[in-house]
Image (tube, grey):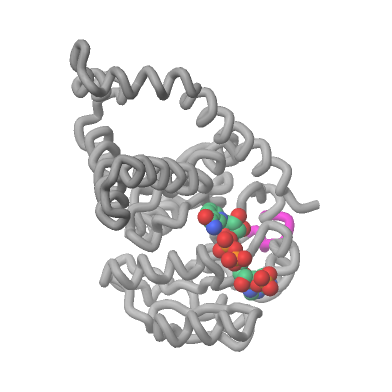
Amino acid sequence: MSHLSNDKAKLAIIGAGKMGEAIIAGLLKSEKYKPRDIQIFEIIENRRKYVSQTYKVTSAKSIGDAASFADITIIAVKPGDMKRALEEIGQVIKKGKIVVSIAAGVTLEFLRKYLPKDVSVFRVMPNMACMAREAMIVISPSENTAKEKLELVTSTLSLLGRAIVLDEKYLNLATGLVGSGPAYIYLIIEALADAGVRLGLPKDISIILAAQTTLGAAKMVTETGEHPAKLKDMVTTPAGTTIEGLLALEEGKLRAVIMNAVTKAAERARQLQPT
Ligand SMILES: NC(=O)c1ccc[n+]([C@@H]2O[C@H](COP(=O)([O-])OP(=O)(O)OC[C@H]3O[C@@H](n4cnc5c(N)ncnc54)[C@H](OP(=O)(O)O)[C@@H]3O)[C@@H](O)[C@H]2O)c1
């Protein structure tokens, strides 16, 4: 990787679907990346045209071309398409390169089966907030990964949000929370906004009030480092308005419902492992 400048790795995105696009959009938004630093390989013609024209990135003619161009090849195809993509990549990827899979449920052991030993392999779980550069990204390197390779992957993905390194045993669990979590929060934002509309607020205003309140609450947790229970306590006064609302949430078993949702999604991630 002698041509690496300012720690910036050239990237190939194999599968420019929703997640592939979110990664490209976030990296370009960071301004550290320019379209010339990224190539895509995508099998659906319409999708290939849309992504290459929208983001001005090169559409490679083959997986081999994309993987030769890149320092880091990110595989962003669905779990069921992983085997085919890996078989192709395994045949063309060169020594010293990095392969990152973001496929839910696909283990490092499975990835390793198709890739040469001298390639660094990572299993990563991001979420769609890559597009807004506020993703949560969990990174698991395979055993014996060189420190500089881990640093390069972590610094690259950190451009898309907050990246942490975790042992692979946590990855399916993180999928239930990190990968699927935005959908749960959208549902909550939608419900908050609907409540505003029910009370008479204009729809567009209600959505902004709900979304900004959610963003502010999340930032309070990340910026103060306080336990959410303590922050909740700070906005709950005796005989006040919030405690009334909290009672309704407890009666509706909101916590149990959310815990169940994450557990179900994590179980599903485990089932997605291709054979
Ligand atoms: N969406 C999320 O929120 C999210 C979050 C975290 C992780 N992920 C993971 O990210 C991966 C992609 O998810 P997605 O939601 O972006 O799916 P998607 O929108 O279906 O994107 C996958 C794209 O890759 C194409 N493709 C399939 N096989 C290919 C190959 N061999 N070479 C090149 N392109 C190929 C697909 O075409 P076809 O439609 O013809 O197959 C599709 O256009 C999944 O493994 C998922 O588990 C997703």
Spot occupied by residue 172 in the image (x, y as percentages of width and height): 60, 40
Q: Quadrant of ligand 1?
A: bottom right
Q: Quadrant of the N terminus?
A: bottom left
In the rendered image, is residue 21 in sight?
yes
Residue at 38% in and 63% down: 131
Image position of 13 with respect to 130: above or below: below
How far from the left and from the top, in percent, is residue 139? 48, 47
Residue 97 seen: no
- Whether residue 214 appears in magenta in the rendering, the answer is no
Relative to 140, does residue 59 appear above or below in the rendering? below
What span is colored magenta in the figure?
112-117
Q: Nearer the viewer, residue 149 or 24?
A: 24
Residue 46: quadrant of the picture? bottom right
Identify which residue is drawn at 36% across, 65% down.
Answer: 26
User: Which image quadrant for residue 176?
Assistant: top right
Specify whether 223 is left or right of 109. Answer: left
The residue positioned 65% from the left and 47% from the top of the image is 105
Horizontal side of 220 relative to 126 (left or right) equals left
263 up-or-down from 202: above or below = above
Depth check: 136 or 239 in front?
239
In this view, the residue farthest toward the top is 238
Between residues 102 and 133, which one lies in front from this camera angle?
A: 133
Q: Please provide percent x and percent y for residue 244.
A: 31, 19
Point 23% across, 22% down: residue:
241
Q: Nearer the viewer, residue 86 or 196?
A: 196
Q: Residue furthest right?
A: 275
Q: On the image, which quarter does residue 149 sit in?
A: bottom left
